[in-house]
Image (cartoon, rainbow, N blue to C red):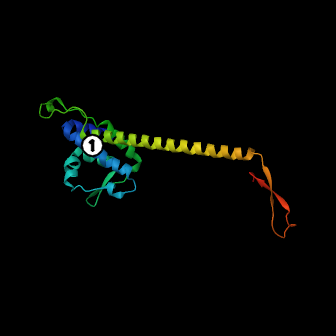
């Protein structure tokens, strides 16, 4: 873990803050994709010939060292991730280095940017939407649960009420040869 940290410190010392932020955001995205899609092998395989990946990450010595130390290996012209056991540590370390402040030489009116990056704002927006969606699901669940509990309570009360009603005995004439003609039989009403 210390070697990984040293790679990121070296990155912040050798590159300007914009390059560092972009590299760290891309490294975070790569590792989070693996974490969230652990069964999908496409996220574990990168091509160093990909122009965007090469320019933003692989061409930076510190980033390359970081990836190799965090479990990436080079196989047949591709870069493959094969170390799940420290994936969370890698993500946590990248999050620690995410907010890199520009150096004094980078502060001028054309490049001055304060606040959060687009990726951070987008992530916060997604988190906020997920929380709202979750709260909505919980509210619907609670409403449904309350309805079902009330329904069960009413059914139990009705069953109990039916059990307590006195059974009424009625007589009715029975036609046929089973009994003497005109005989009456007793039936129970309101019970089982």
Q: Name the residue under label 1.
A: 25
Q: In which quarter of the image is the C terminus?
A: bottom right
- Residue 4 seen by the camera: no
Residue 160: percent from the left, percent from the top?
70, 44
Q: Quadrant of residue 133?
A: top left
Q: In which quarter of the image is residue 44?
A: bottom left
Residue that sits furthest to the bottom in the current view: 177
109 horizontally vs 59: left or right: left
Residue 184: percent from the left, percent from the top?
84, 60
Q: Nearer the viewer, residue 58 or 156?
A: 156
Q: In this view, does 140 lie above or below 108?
A: below
Residue drawn at x 85%, y 64% as measured from the top left: 182
Look at the numbered disc 1 and give the secondary structure of its residue.
helix
172 horizontally vs 3: left or right: right
Q: Nearer the viewer, residue 162 or 117?
A: 162
Residue that sits furthest to the front in the current view: 182
Crowd tier of the residue under label 1, counting other residues whose Cα lies within 10 Å: few below 14, some 14–19, many 20 or above? many
68 horizontally vs 163: left or right: left
Q: Which of 191 and 28 is in front in this view?
A: 191
Residue 139: percent from the left, percent from the top?
46, 41
Could you tell me how many numbered marks the image carries? Answer: 1
Residue that sits furthest to the right in the current view: 180
Residue 23: percent from the left, percent from the top?
24, 43
Q: Quadrant of the N terminus?
A: top left
Residue drawn at x 83%, y 59% as measured from the top left: 185
Q: Which of 8 and 55 is in front in this view?
A: 55
- Residue 56 seen by the camera: yes
Q: Is residue 103 above or below residue 134?
A: above
Residue that sits furthest to the top in the current view: 104
């Amino acid at each position: 873990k210390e070697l990984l940290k040293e790679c990121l410190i070296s990155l912040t010392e050798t590159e300007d803050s914009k390059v560092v932020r972009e590299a760290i955001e891309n490294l975070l995205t790569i590792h989070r994709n693996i974490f969230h899609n652990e069964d999908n092998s496409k996220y574990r395989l990168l091509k160093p010939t990909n122009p965007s990946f090469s320019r933003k990450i692989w061409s930076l010595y510190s980033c390359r060292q970081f990836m190799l130390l965090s479990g990436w290996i080079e196989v047949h012209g591709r870069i493959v991730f094969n170390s799940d056991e420290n994936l969370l540590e890698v993500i946590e370390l990248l999050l620690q280095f995410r907010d890199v402040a520009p150096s004094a030489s980078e502060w001028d009116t054309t490049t001055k940017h304060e606040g959060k990056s687009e990726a951070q704002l987008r992530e916060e927006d997604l988190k906020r939407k997920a929380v709202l969606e979750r709260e909505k699901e919980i509210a619907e669940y609670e409403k449904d649960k309350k309805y079902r509990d009330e329904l069960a309570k009413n059914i139990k009360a009705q069953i109990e009420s039916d059990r307590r009603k006195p059974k009424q005995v009625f007589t009715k004439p029975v036609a046929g040869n089973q009994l003497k003609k005109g005989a009456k039989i007793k039936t129970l009403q309101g019970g089982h």
